[in-house]
Image: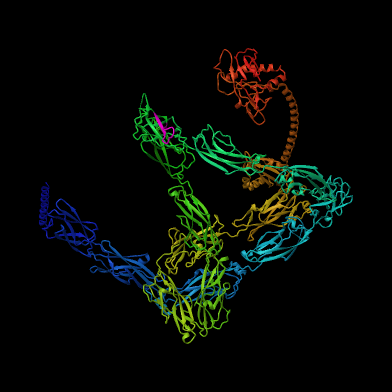
Amino acid sequence: MRLRMYSTLGLILLLVLLVTVDRVDSNGQPRFKDASKPGQYYIFKETLAEGTQLDIELYATDPDGSQVKFSSNQSDFFNITPSLVDSGTIVHVFLIRRFDYETQRRFQVKFSVTDGALTVDKTVRIDIEDQNDEKPKFDRNSNQYSINVPENAQKGSIHLNFTTTDPDTNDGVTYQLVGDSASESKFEVKKGSEVNTITPGSIELKGCLDYEEQSYYEFTIVATDNTGNNASAIVIVKITDTEDKPPEFINVGSYNQQVNEDLAIGDTVTTVSARDGDRGVGMKSTIKYSFKDANTYFAVNESTGVITVKDILDRDSPNLINKGGFLSFKVVAEEMRSDESTVVASTIGVCHGSTANSTMIDVFITVNDLNDNRPKFDNETYEASVRENTRGAALSKKGEKGSVLLLNVKDNDQGSNGEFELSVNNSAFYVQPNKGFREALVTVIVQNKTALDFEQQDVLVLEVYATESSTRNVTTAKIIVHLENINDNSPYFTQTTYSASIPENSPVDTFVIQLQASDKDKGDFGNIAYALRGNNDGIFKIDKNNGSVYVNKAQLDREKIFSYYLTAEAKDTELSSTTQLEVTLTDENDNAPVCSSSDYVSQLEEDKHKLQRQITIQATDNDEKNTNNSKLTFHLEPSEYSGNFSVSRTTGLLTVYRSLDYEELNGKEDIKLVVVTKDQGSPQLSCTSNIIITVLDKNDNSPIFNQPAYSTTIYENRTNGEVIQVNATDKDKAGDPNSRIIYRIQELTDKFRIDPNDGAISVASGARFDRDLKSSYMYTVRAFDGGSPQLSGSCNVSISLLDNNNKKPVFKNLPNTTSVLENTVNKTFFRCIAVDKDTNTDLWYSLNKAESFYVNDTKGDIKGLFVIDGRTGNVSVSITGGIDREMVEKYELTIHVEDLNAEDPSPQITSATLTVDVSDENDNYPVFGKNHYEGKVTEIASEKLDSPINVITVKATDADQNKAIKYSDDSEDFNITQEGLIRLVKAVDREKQPWLNFTIFAEDNGGLISNASVSITLFDVNDNSPNVTLNKTVPVAEDTMTETVITHVMARDEDSGNNAKLIFILDSSRDTFIINSTTGAISLNKLLNREDTDGEEYTLQIRVEDKGDPPRVTIKTITVTVTDVNDNPPKFDGGNQPVTVLENENIGKVIATVEATDKDIGKNKELQYSVIEGMPLNATDLFRLDNTTGEVKVNASLRGNVGIYKLIIQATDKGVPPLSSNMTLTITVEDVNDNKPVFSVPSLPNEIFEILESDKADIDIITVKATDADRGQNGQVYYELVDSLDSRSFKLDTNTGKLATANVTDRETKASYTLTIKALDNGSPQQFSRITIQIDITDANDNDPEFSRSELESPYIIGSIEEETTGTVLPKAVNKARDKDENSTICYFIVGGIAMNNFSINHKTGVITCTTKIDSDQTPRVQSVKLVIEATDKSSSCSVKPSPVDYVHTKKQLLLVQINVIDINDNPPRFRNKTFNAGVTKDSSAKDQVIFKLNDYINDVDIINNNSFYLAGNINARPPKLVDDIKKNYKLNTIFGVNKTTGEIKANIDFDAGMFGYVWFDVIVNDTKGLSDNASISIYLVGQGQQLKITAFMGIDEFNRVKDDFVRKLTEIVGHEVIIDKIVGRSEKLGSKTDIYIHLVNKKTKEVLSTDAILNTFDNNYDKLSSFYKAFKVSDVVDPSFQAEDEAWSKDTIIYILVVVCLCFLLLLIVSSAMFCTYRRKYRRKLKATTTMAFGSTDHLNPVNIPNSNKFEGHNPVFGEVHENGQEYFFTDDTESQKSGSSDFNNSLDNNEIEYKEMDYSVTYLGDTALPSVTPMEIASSNNFLAAALKQQEMAKNRKNAQLNSESEATTPNSKQNGVLDNRNLFTFINPDFNADENTSNGDVGSTMVINGLETTEI
């Protein structure tokens, strides 16, 4: 068998070998499918993209069926991707690198295919088709050309030739010149003839050139082939200069100077500087300066341009005053050209003409006034008088009573230099005014009257100071003030209180004390008389002349009265003062101490230090307390045991000093002590006390336990046996009862017992433990000894129980009923909770399925519907579910809980039942047509909609049978109707919410609710102003850079669209700040310097407006505070000057002092000097620096130290952070060589050299030259270029001094270089010099000037001019345009504005001058004018004026400027009339009342009209008698005064009633310029009976507007002068009224008409006055005096009537009270409270009104009032009417009213007939109640009062308790028949009777 198997295996192997050999021998060669073709040819475009699949498809097969592989020799261009097909392999070729015809036009690609053993190749030819994909190329690789063209080159001249090539075969290259307008206007490009791929081109001049206008052009040449491919090259054209421009002034801003008037002749004012207008290299001509016109004050140096003072400048001279201190003149700068330059200029071609060789500029000099005049008083010394102690009085001239002292002060300085402040050196006075300008009249007024005291100083010397506001220079005037004496000082005692003491037994005339009083007044005012008040029956007396007090009666007894209080008075002629005098009686020792007890007893335990009863010896002494006479001391008399005790000397307390031992007393128990009490008087008196002390023995040792606490544990099933034993000991003597111990458990317990002898604790018999009820026991065990008193000790014993698991678990929430919703799956719906009192429980829940079933018609299996979690007890519906309420409505589940750790019994299982009710659910929900609805509505700006607005309609459907759907929503703004219509019902604000989202609901009958969302988009209206948020105060450091954003104005607009687009505008910033109109960012426009004027704070007004129609605007204000920084480093004065010192200089010699200054202040300015480095190193040893003074001293011997030393000295300020500056102090220590090289070329330091920027290096600039006065080696000079960043762009030949560029120069990269060149000699020590030169790189002009819209507000306010003036130069020039080109000349022209012909402008400086007067007093008033300014650089000579244009904000070459026109005081104030009339009443005080206000009657067309009013001339009076009456007491010229400021005229006196007539005088009004007007005013004395009161139905403001017409028209009607005396406004309910008090003056006689005459005049002109009354709403015309009498009479009458009425009322009250008391006694307790309730009702109903009861306070039969049934009763008092039943009424006699809330009702009908249909109101309305009540009342009258009272006060269930009547069972209705039976029932309640069938019970 095995052999057979081997044979079969061998055959199989042989077969496999044969097959393999056959296959190897017959391998076929792979081949391409089209191998018969010799090759393939393809053409592709060169523009094919990478990744393109080429249209080449190769197909190869292998006859053996082997898989073949492809490859290519051009793998960097082609990618081969094979794909297997049924019969072979197909290859797809992809392009992986783009073709380039210009690089390679043909490919021979060899493709190879191999099967791994044999390979076959195939070559494919690919030709590339050319595409136009190459750009033309310029002949310069850099694509940049640079050429130089002279400015006089002719048009058409060629200045550049170039070529381009294009490798593509396509031809047709064109050229285009692209650049700015300037370049395109000057140059053009021309194309030449093409040769092959080369196209020539050239640049030709198209327009004339001007070096000064533009010296540099840059443009681009674009070469484009015919398919649009293009290339570009940059052409830079530099214009070379020729001499053709006049000079131009530089530093123009310094030609407006201010100088002080104190400049000396020859002092420099300013320097004008001009340079050659031709800016090219080598174009330097000499400039000569001169004045255009002769100049009086100044001279100019023709070479340097320095302007100096030629004549004295006196600001106060008439000429300068007339010119306002302003001088202007023109300076001419003339260029001294060479002859050659003139020839060159004349031979310029057609592009240029001849030019001027001079130019002019305006120089403005303002001469400032110096404060060289101090204020000056008209006198150096004044004398004045004033009464002492008088406040508010002005100083009067001495000897001229009533004449006010006036000090005249003048200051001749101009402007603010003429301002001065006035003050006085004494605070008791003040001056008025306290400030002055040029001149002031000063009054000195008393401010502190207490400082004016004649008695202290009768003459005061005051100094009045006039202090200049600016310089604080002071001028002083002296006033000698004489005080006038008055009696203004009361006498005063030297002490506020006095006290004295005398012995109680003092005899009569004993001296007590002397009182002293003084009076500061002098003369008779100072005489004083003394007296006593409150003298206690004359026990004391006083000497009225000297104030001595004596004993007057010998009745002084201290025990009765120990102190007397007296009042002493001091009085001068009229004033007095008092003081208090206390006289104390001193005591004598005349009382011995009295001991309270003579015997004391106490006990003392042995070893104790405290008596059982404390003993304190008590005694008293009647002598004076707190004196030696009553001071008691206690003393212990010596005895056997007195050493064991002590007694307090002061308190008498007996204490144990040393304890006693009972055993040492030898049986002696009682100890006797003696205490003596003594006083300290003289003689000393005493008393004695005895003390008995009993000593007691004691048990003084307690038992003590071995441990303070014991503890043990037992199991809770323990029933007997010992638990623990305690042990205690007693240190008392063994065997005695004091040491015998008995144990006892302190607490009562039946669980444990203790052996009283040995302390063993065991379980008590029958004790049972339950750890669940109590887990431990705590006891206190006490040990008692047998002593007396018995002592004990205690310890704590703790016994803890160990648990046994012996209790079943118990359900806490079962049995129970719960519910679950049908269709519930895998959800917990109930949790079973069980507890087990054992501690080591393990509870497990289970569902007893055998005992669980469903309940329907029958019971059934629950079929696994429910599961329970054994650990948690959670009952759940199983995961399969299947609960269907329609099949089963209830399940009863049996739940088991088992304690798995049960011990005894075991097992422990508890069962309970859980009932599960299945709840039904509504399965189908309503469905809306959409899930989301959208609508649109415009926001409503008003608060309330007039009617709802329909928005959108929705609809919902329900698949259930109950299809009734109710719609609702949750929106407050919309509602939905039951038809599904959504309406807007409230005003909505889009800004609060741009859209409103809410939910609508559809609810079916079953309560299923579906919802859909609704979005309502609100359209906006512009109803919100921008809400601006900003920082009100912004601190900005002064070193903040420009363009720095300092703050952001945050604004938002709640609107949308254009309504929310905001524009930020900065209304005012003084050019310092700008705001971004879009972002609100405020940034710095100009550098800040806190030290500048007005540089500390800026107020910016921000205006934010939206783009709504109309726009809404918000305006806010920001305050920018500039904070100081330490931004000024110290600066060394004098530069880095070297110091030379001989080597033999003395040590300590100061060889140099360095000094630095710091512009900062405070700590920032304090400097400290230090040497930070010395070169060489020993420099710091040879020299030392004083850190404070900066002195450099020789520190060591310099001999042998010849050479150059450098000290780098640093000056550091104390700012934070500190700033410092360094200087290098070069110290040359030399012996011979003492000369430095000196530069001769250049001759001046800081000289400027200009070169054209160039792309070439090695451009020569200058050859510097320096010489050295020394000879030999010390005089040989060589040069060095000090290394710096700037110096690296230049090179300097050290021997020749030739300076040239080392690199190309580019002005755009760097426009200026500063170089320092050193010239050094070869001496020893070596000397050197430095010179600094500046090299400026010139540029071309190719940009137009522009005004910055962000820096300059529109309009740009450039200043103000006064009206009616010419020649005013506006302070702000408009030369604010900026040109990016450096060499451009900007010219300024006025091209627009209504007033453009009134102004001229300096075209170069932009300074605007007013040439024609402007009058602002036009209608309307001209407050400002606007001009349009245009900036242009088209003409360097500013000779071409642009055409007039209107201002367009987008044209930045235009600037709108505003010039404010200042109104000047060129119009005098004018009185409206030349005469005025006024009146002053005589019947009341006229003094200080305003009679007339002149300021109300002034017209002044000027804006500024600070007018002053004066009384001119004398005051006149008529008739002569009035003059005489006035002069009796006053000076006529002083009776009236005029307020200078307000023009108020006041009377200085009161006019008597007997004065008649009028007073007149002239008044003048002046303005600040001195323009004036005058008028006359007459003031009439008006008495009682000469006035009329007119009442107008209008407010006082309305009347004031028509007051002049009122007076004028009334005067015309009545024919007399109408004068208004007083106007009084008042408000009433019907509106405002004004009372006008007037009087009339006869025009001829000047007499004041009486009131009767006025009324007669009014009656005679009644017809004319009718229209007058109507026009001025006159409602009443009365005599004011009659009205006052009527009012007075009315008040008296009212008072009289009130008195009579009160008396009558009082009498009536007395009578009524008497009657009331009588009736009250008679009818007391007659009225009973009744209530009713409807029959058969068990509920409390509203009570009905019962007649004749006091249940309701509206009726009381005692007062005879009748209550109408069914009607409300009102009781009316003086203030209001109130309904019956109000708790506020209290007219019940016995106060038995019942509150509704506290009543209980019981109504019972008795009898055969029930009346269920009778209502309580019907019962109450019947006559039953009335009849029963009346009969009850009549029967009660026959009873005695005592019986009634006793019955009513008896204690019954119905008695009144706590003020509330219990009304239960008050009435019982038997039958509504009118039977007059009288029965008695309810005897326990009270007397009950039946009246007319109505049973009543009286309480």
Let me know if residue 924 appears in the view.
no
Q: Position of residue 1258 (x, y in %)?
A: 38, 76
Judging depth in this view, the residue of 1476 and 739 nearest the camera is 739
Instruction: Judge whether residue 318 is colored magenta.
Output: no
Instruction: Judge whether residue 895 is colored magenta.
Output: yes
* Number of numbered markers: 0
> Which residue, as the protein is rendered here, is positioned at the far front?
735
Image quarter of residue 1843: top right
Query: On the rendered structure, is 1124 left or right of 176?
Result: right
Location of the C terminus (image quadrant): top right
Image quarter of residue 1845: top right
Query: On the rendered structure, is 108 left or right of 1086?
Result: left
Up-down relation of residue 355 to residue 591 (above or below)? below
Up-down relation of residue 113 to residue 901 (above or below)? below
Query: On the rendered structure, is 694 left or right of 196?
Result: right
Colour scheme in the image? rainbow
Let me know if residue 218 appears in the view.
yes
Q: Position of residue 1475 (x, y in %)?
A: 68, 53
Judging depth in this view, the residue of 1242 and 1732 nearest the camera is 1732
Image quarter of residue 322: bottom right
Up-down relation of residue 905 to residue 1580 (above or below)? above
Q: Position of residue 1034 (x, y in %)?
A: 52, 57
Q: Position of residue 1548 (x, y in %)?
A: 73, 53
- Region in magenta: 892-909
Judging depth in this view, the residue of 433 and 9 nearest the camera is 9
